[in-house]
Image (cartoon, rainbow, N blue to C red):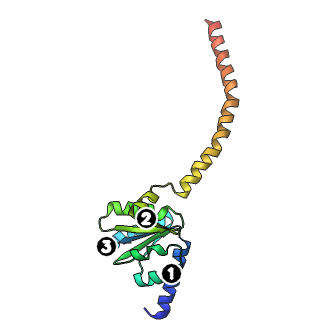
Amino acid sequence: MDRAQKEQLVDELGQIFESSGVVVVSHYAGLTVAEMQDLRAKAREAGGSVRVAKNRLAKIALEGKPCASIAGLLTGMTVLTYSEDPVAAAKVAQDFAKGNDKFVILGGAMGENALDVAGVEAVSKMPSREELISTIAGMLGAPASNIAGAIGAPASNIASILSTIEDKAAA
C-alpha cells in the first residue's frame, strides 16, 4: 500500500468515525472468511457496515474525532462495526458475538461517550430508531381509534338493547 492509498484510507476512516452513531471494536482472530461474510451481511441488513483496517491508520484517523477514546482498543486483529443508527451496529456485534466465541467485543464509542463491553451490551438492548418510530406512531394513532370506538359504541349499545327487547317481545 503506497502513501496515497494510506492517506485515502485515513480519510475514509475519518469520515466513518465522524458520521457514525456508534462504533464497536472487536477482535476477530480465528474467524473464517464465511463467518466474516456472514457478519458483513448481518451488518448491511441492519443498516451498518463492517471494516477491517490497520490499527495504526485507524488511530491516525481518530485524531480529533468525537470517538477518539477508542484508540486504546485498537490492538491486535480488530474489526470495526459501525452504523449511523446508534443501536444497529451494537446489536449486530452483540448477536454475532453470542453465536461465535472467536468474535470478542472490546468496547466502542457512541459519539463522544466511550463504551466498555457492558456499555455495548446495554446499547444493543435499546430499541432501534425504527422501533421507536413505530411505537410513537402507535401512540399517536391510539387516541384516534379510541375516539372512533367511543363514537361507535353508543350505536352498537342501542342495537344490542333493541335486539334484546325484540327477543323478549318475541318470547
Residue 107 location, quadrant: bottom left
Question: What whole-number distance in Å separates the C-alpha atoms at marks 1 and 3?
Answer: 31 Å
- Three-letter amino acid code at the position of disc 3: Thr
The mark found on residue 63 in the picture is 1
* x 69%, y 24%: residue: 154
Residue 143 figure quarter: top right
Q: Secondary structure at mark 1?
A: loop
The residue lying at 52 percent from left, 57 percent from top is 128
Query: Is the C-beta separation of discs 3 and 2 under 8 Å?
Result: no
Quarter of the image where the N terminus is located? bottom left
Alpha carbon separation for disc pair 3 and 2: 15 Å
> Can residue 63 be seen by looking at this rendering?
yes
- Residue 64 x %, y %: 53, 79
Q: Secondary structure at mark 3?
A: loop
The residue at the point 35 percent across, 63 percent down is 97
Disc 2, SS: helix
The disc placed on residue 42 is: 2
Left or right, 84 with respect to 42, comes to right
Q: Quadrant of residue 101?
A: bottom left
Kind of residue sitting beneath label 2 = Lys
Q: Mark 3 — residue? A: 32
Give the x, y percent position of residue 106: 37, 69
Q: Position of residue 43 (x, y in %)?
A: 45, 66
Q: Earlier in the sequence, mark 1 or mark 3?
A: 3
Q: Residue at x 35, y 72 (%)?
A: 27
Q: Earlier in the sequence, mark 1 or mark 2?
A: 2
Nearer-N-terminus badge (3/2) = 3
